[in-house]
Amino acid sequence: MKKTPFLTLEKAREITAQIPTPFHLYDEAGIRANARALKEAFSWNKGFREFFAVKATPNPYIVKLLHEEGCGCDCATYTELVLAEAVGVTGHDVMFSSNVTPEKDMRKAREMGVYINLDDATYVDFLAGMGDVPETVCLRYNPGGSFSLGNTIMDMPRDAKYGMTEDQMAGAINRLMKLGTKHFGIHAFLASNTTTNEYYPELAAQLFRLAVRLRNATGCHISFVNLSGGIGVDYRPEQPKCDIKVIGEGVRQRYEQILTPQGMDDVAIFTELGRFMLAPYGHLISTVLHQKHIYREYVGLDACAADLMRPAMYGAYHHITVLGKEDAILDHVYDVTGGLCENNDKFAIERSLPEIDIGDIVAIHDTGAHGHSMGYNYNGKLRSAEVLLKEDGSFQLIRRAETVQDYFATFDFTDFKFQY
Ligand SMILES: *Cc1c(COP(=O)(O)O)cnc(C)c1O
């Protein structure tokens, strides 16, 4: 399907007149509509809840907007917990799915009274060492082997550092019940960025069967199944797009086949989506600074891999629209690059695009999740601003761009008689 940006050149000019490029722009209307569609798709389940994976877009304005749509937060670190707390998202509005967890982080999670998702059975003692165990505890599962849909291997859980074995889960549940835990959740994240409607239903079926076995083995009460993240987006125009309604319906069928006959129809479905919630509703907006003609045609942007790491890191495809040239023929082939001293700093390689001029504004698509948040400061590049395009067409700076002062803030220059 043709990918169209959520803003026009005219709107981009209006914003760039006040906020210089590059910046990540988020589409409030799109974010809200998608969050509502997710809620609707799982409305058959009374306890359904999405805990937005904060790492995807750790901005308090985005977290607040999603909280208004009924979403909680999935946090993995002390800092992410503090971010959620700052927005007023705490207690059972937060899922703490961490691994290799420092004591400080676990204490903060206990203090906030959030749901704790244990990555390993050894964490039961870690938890018990901090006082009373919580009334509800979630356990992260790793089935080992490979995870397949039909004949396609999606991922290799046996190579993943996360979660625990089924026997370890049963042992942890028995110990926790003795210590006073009354309710349990189970969680697994077995494949990332899936674009098939079958991932969640298959994962749900595996977790529902596990829930039945664990209940039978230990007599515990399973109060929720956490399907975690993993629903992907169509980064490429020719890719299929997930249909959240079909996914919700697929999970409902497995629920009624597996849990309902076991009398387990009070189990709530939780999700921790990040990419699906935000990726399509973010664009990296950037201006063309230079062009060069050597063995290939190059277009140099004012954004670089420090603003969006995915292409450099994973060779990920991000669609690019030259604003104002949406309907022009794609009769030029360019490498679209940033200015890092790294040859992998390319947003696109040999991409067919319309003829580009210096000063053109481009929208790099699907940067709303794992975009700004994966930014870094290599080469002294400063992280870009974040801007929210509101439903009424107005816009708001929700994070300013970094300055040189920010970059130097962690140095003590006293020995150098220097102040920036
Ligand atoms: C990263 C992560 C998510 C979100 O994953 P997406 O692919 O962005 O949906 C959810 N849960 C956990 C534990 C994660 O690490």
Image (cartoon, helix red, strand yellow):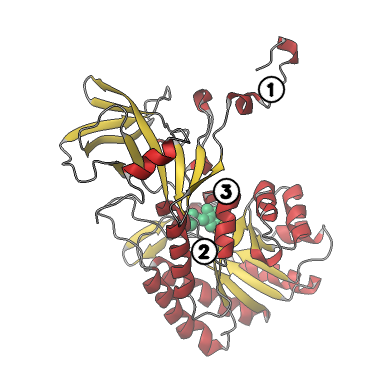
Q: CA distance from mark 2 to mark 3?
A: 30 Å
Q: CA distance from mark 3 to mark 1?
A: 25 Å
How crowded pointer 1 is (Cα within 10 Å; few <14, some 14-19, many 20+) is rated as few
Q: Are marks 2 and 1 in contact (CB under 8 Å)?
A: no
Q: Nearer the viewer, residue 383 or 129?
A: 383
Q: Which residue is mark 3?
A: 58
Any part of residue 314 in sight: no
Q: Are marks 2 and 3 in contact (CB under 8 Å)?
A: no
Tally of marks = 3
At a point 27% along the width and 26% down the height, the residue shown is: 298
Q: Are marks 3 and 1 in contact (CB under 8 Å)?
A: no
How crowded pointer 2 is (Cα within 10 Å; few <14, some 14-19, many 20+) is rated as some
Q: Which residue is mark 2?
A: 143
The tag earlier along the polypeptide, 2 or 3, is 3
Q: Which residue is mark 1?
A: 411
Please, what is the three-letter code of the amino acid marked with disc 2?
Answer: Pro
Residue 290, position in %: x, y?
32, 23
Which element is circle 2 on?
loop
At a point 36% along the width and 46% down the height, the residue shown is: 365
Depth-wise, is mark 2 or mark 3 nearer the camera? Answer: 3
Residue 357, position in %: x, y?
25, 29
How crowded pointer 3 is (Cα within 10 Å; few <14, some 14-19, many 20+) is rated as many
The quadrant holding residue 347 is: top left
Please, what is the three-letter code of the amino acid marked with disc 3?
Answer: Pro
At a point 29% along the width and 28% down the height, the residue shown is: 299
Q: CA distance from mark 2 to mark 1?
A: 45 Å
Residue that lies at the very extreme toward the right in this rendered image: 131
Please, what is the three-letter code of the amino acid marked with disc 1?
Answer: Phe
The tag earlier along the polypeptide, 2 or 1, is 2
